[in-house]
Image (spheres, grey):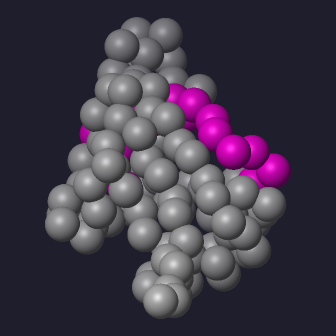
């Protein structure tokens, strides 16, 4: 899936910006707490995850592999309740990767 990088000039209007924030070991893996990414206007969460796994390597993918180890929030809502990896991202959306914590 084309995420919008290196699009021809005439297609750039179809690019949106999203914000990402990483916590826990993903923050260490990405060496960034936050970043702004340009993606295609029809980008879905699954496509973003694929891109980030390519960008940050196997460690990133490994950390997300057990889907219950991180909660992915889209604008503060659990992505599992927003169509999961099929959720379409929009201009200005914020995607946050939060580790699941347990305890009592």
Farthest top residue in view: 10
Q: 15 and 7: which one is in front?
A: 15
Magenta stretch in the rendered image? 30-45
Describe residue 37's horizontal placement relative to residue 79 as left or right: right
Q: What residue is rendered at 25% in x and 70% in y?
A: 80
The structure residue drawn at horizontal position 36% and vertical position 13%, both measured from the top left corner, is 13
Q: Residue at x 63, y 36 (%)?
A: 35
Instruction: Give whichever of 7, 63 is nearer the camera.
Output: 63
Q: Quadrant of residue 94?
A: top left
Residue 37 located within the stretch drawn in magenta: yes
Q: Residue at x 63, y 59 (%)?
A: 23
Task: Report the side of 23 relative to 18 (left or right).
Answer: right
The image position of residue 74, as x and y in percent, is 33, 50
Tag count in the figure?
Answer: 0
Residue 54 in view: no
Q: Is residue 90 magenta?
A: no
Q: Residue 57 appears at what percent x and percent y? A: 75, 66
Q: Residue 9, percent across and down?
A: 49, 10
Residue 84 appears in view: yes
Above or below, 88 relative to 49: above
- The residue most toward the front is 104
Front residue of this view, candidates 24 and 36: 24
**Please, is residue 45 above or below residue 95 in the view?**
below
- Picture quadrant of residue 56: bottom right
Q: Give the camera-side residue of 40 and 35.
A: 35
Q: Position of residue 67 (x, y in %)?
A: 45, 82
Residue 58 horizontal side relative to residue 44, left or right: right
In this view, 94 is above or below 57: above
């Amino acid at each position: 899936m084309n995420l919008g990088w290196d699009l021809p000039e005439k297609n750039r209007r179809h690019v949106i910006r999203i914000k990402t924030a990483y916590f826990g070991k993903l923050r260490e893996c990405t060496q960034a707490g936050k970043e702004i990414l340009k993606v295609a206007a029809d980008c879905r969460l699954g496509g973003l995850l694929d891109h980030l796994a390519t960008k940050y390597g196997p460690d990133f993918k490994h950390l997300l592999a057990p889907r219950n180890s991180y909660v992915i929030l889209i604008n503060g809502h659990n992505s599992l309740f927003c169509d999961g990896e099929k959720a379409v991202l929009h201009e200005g959306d914020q995607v946050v990767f939060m580790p699941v914590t347990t305890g009592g």
